[in-house]
Amino acid sequence: MRRNLVIGNWKMHGDIQRNQLLLEKIVDGLRELNHADYVVCVPNIYIFQARALLENTNIAWGGQNVNQFEEGAFTGAIAPHMLTDLGCTYVILGHSERRNLFFETNLTAAARFDAAIRAGLTPVFCVGETLEEHEAGLTEVIVASQMDAVMATLSDADFAKAMAVNMVFAYEPVWAIGTGKTATPQQAQSVHQFIRHRIARRNPDAAAKVRIIYGGSVKAHNAADLFAMPDVDGGLIGGASLLADEFIAICQAANSVASSTCLMELT
Ligand code: 13P
């Protein structure tokens, strides 16, 4: 049984005052939701603040990217141990905005994945096709190439390490990000199933355990239907993670889908 996971990706939003209000409301709203896992990935400069407000709650915090090197002359970069130093447990990697706006490649993303698991961080590795690729019927080809960039570079020992830190995959169709156009639950399910099969080729046990979350215009009104799909294990939330009520409602959907599955398994 996989627990649902909801991750808020704040992207480049926030300031000290707004963060505090948002985090206080979220802490309050999620306090009783014990059937899923919750994370917020804030801009690096606010990780200190997130730690202060989220310590001893059921919400974890993480980074939105990390460099593959441990230290050195890399102006503006953050090393994996810096994230763990501040209590981060998760890091988003290979986000389409990093790929498209900052020219990060599959190779960079794979190197960062490796560096993250070595530091004990849980990587949330994003894959997804653009609108043109989608319309050309290339979704599975693109997703496979992005996944293989990671899978092919992992030795068996590193694969085991990735499982030990509970690696996560996020399917984020680029055409659904920030556009208000969500993949239908069936579209998401089909790609998530494809991702799980791809992992199964490497290790069937791992495939059954890995959480694959969906991102792209997830809102309070569509979250429950997405999370009800058998291979959709939660969501990676952009815009709606900045609105306390929306984010809490999405987390409630993840929490209740998870608990109803628990009940079904018990009966
Ligand atoms: P939106 O939820 O704003 O579409 O963003 C999704 C995303 O990119 C999360 O990483």
Image (cartoon, helix red, strand yellow):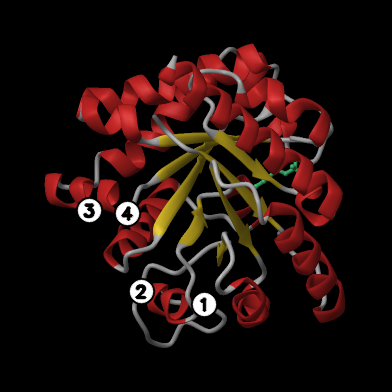
Q: Which residue is mark 4?
A: 165
Give the image quadrant in which the ligand numbered 1 is located.
top right
Q: Which numbered circle lies on residue 161?
A: 3
Residue 16: which quarter of the image?
A: bottom right
For the residues labelled 4 and 3, say whether their Cβ atoms are less than 8 Å apart: yes
Residue 110 in the image: state x and y as whole percent. Answer: 36, 51
Q: Residue at x 76, y 47 (%)?
A: 248
Label 2 and label 4: CA atoms lie apart by: 19 Å
The amino acid beneath tag 4 is Val
Q: Residue furthest front?
A: 267
Q: Nearer the viewer, mark 2 or mark 3?
A: 3
Q: SS for tag 4? A: loop
Residue wearing tag 1: 77
Q: Amino acid at mark 3?
A: Lys
Q: Residue at x 66, y 66 (%)?
A: 42
How far is the residue under mark 2 from the one under mark 3?
A: 18 Å
Q: Camera-side residue: 94 or 190?
A: 190
- Left or right of 8 on screen, residue 191: left
Residue 193 vertical placement versus 32 (above, below): above
Residue for badge 2: 69
Of the image marks 3 and 1, the number of the one nearer the N terminus = 1
Gap in angstroms between the C-alphas marked 2 and 1: 9 Å
Do the residues bearing badges 2 and 4 touch, measured as CB atoms within 8 Å? no
Q: CA distance from mark 4 to mark 3?
A: 6 Å
* C-alpha distance separating marks 1 and 4: 23 Å
Kind of residue indicated by mark 2:
Phe
Q: Are marks 2 and 1 in contact (CB under 8 Å)?
A: yes
Element type where label 2 sits in the image: loop
